[in-house]
Image (cartoon, rainbow, N blue to C red):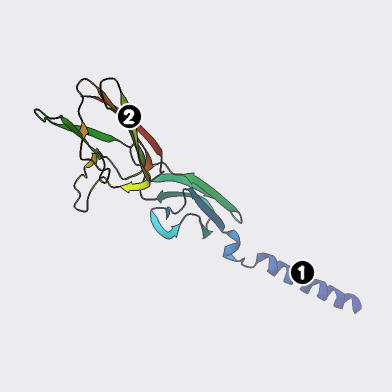
Amino acid sequence: MKSITLLCIVSVCLFIIGCSDDGPTDPKDKKGKLVVKSIPPGARIFLMGNDTGKNTPDSLVDLNPGVYDLFLLLQYYDTAFFSANVVENLTTTKEIILSDALPSVNITLNYTISYGGDSVDSVKFNYTLNQDVLLDSIIIKRPVSTVRDTTEKNTFNSQLFSYEDQSGNPVTYYLPTTGSGRNFYPRIEDTTYFIDFYGRKAHGSGTLFHLSFSQEL
């Protein structure tokens, strides 16, 4: 009798164990996690063409295992396309370096000469930009006579110089600068001005630039 009872208990236990093994599992146990970072941060994350509403760095959770196509959007940077393989029960991390979409800084330099007749001729420079810049300084080596020159440094301490006004028209800047106490430079014939611009991009990667010009008058 005791043998029969023991056998029944063992059978019931085996039945319960079998039912436990065959029962449904939590679907989240088969999900994966994707962490997306970018340099610089703040890029919008798109997953399979859909806006996730998240910006880097951030996590995408409860993803089915598999390969996903993504891209990142950030103003002034090229769109970054990439793929990520999400693995069950694991965290996959992708760090993307974004490429600056802005061109190199370019400055177009021109000048006008005013002929003074019996008085001294004068020259005034003007320049335009191809993008917003943070200007650090402009150094001008200008002739004082045919045998002597002087070097002037205009310091701006990373001041913003916009290349367009609010109407979208190019902004023209002048040398001598406003507030320098003069409206022109004396023109000395057959001499050369040397002008150097130092600064960095105002947007995107903020790349430093140094542009040099020489202008014979």
Q: Residue flagged by tag 1: what amino acid is it?
A: Leu
Report the mark closest to the observer, 1 or 2. Answer: 2
Q: Quadrant of residue 11?
A: bottom right
- Neighbours of disc 2 within 10 Å: few (<14), some (14-19), many (20+): few
Residue shown at 19%/22% (left/top)?
189
Q: Residue 212 carries which label?
A: none
Q: Quadrant of residue 214?
A: top left
Q: Residue beneath label 2, please?
A: 150
Q: Is mark 2 on a helix, strand or loop?
A: strand
**In the current view of this chain or complex, which residue is farthest to the left?**
117
Q: Measuring from the top left, give residue 200's x and y in whole percent.
A: 38, 41
Residue 176, compared with residue 194, is above or below; it is below
Residue 35, compared with residue 212, is above or below; it is below
Q: Is mark 1 on a helix, strand or loop?
A: helix
Q: Residue beneath label 1, please?
A: 14
Q: Left or right: 151 with respect to 83?
A: left
Looking at the image, tell me whether mark 1 or mark 2 is earlier in sequence order: 1
Q: Left or right: 216 with respect to 71?
A: left
Residue shown at 19%/32% (left/top)?
123
Q: Measuring from the top left, give residue 140's x and y in whole percent.
A: 31, 32
Q: Left or right: 133 with respect to 89?
A: left
Q: Foreground residue, 6 or 120? A: 120
**In the current view of this chain or complex, which residue is farthest to the right?**
2
Residue 215, compared with residue 129, is above or below; it is above
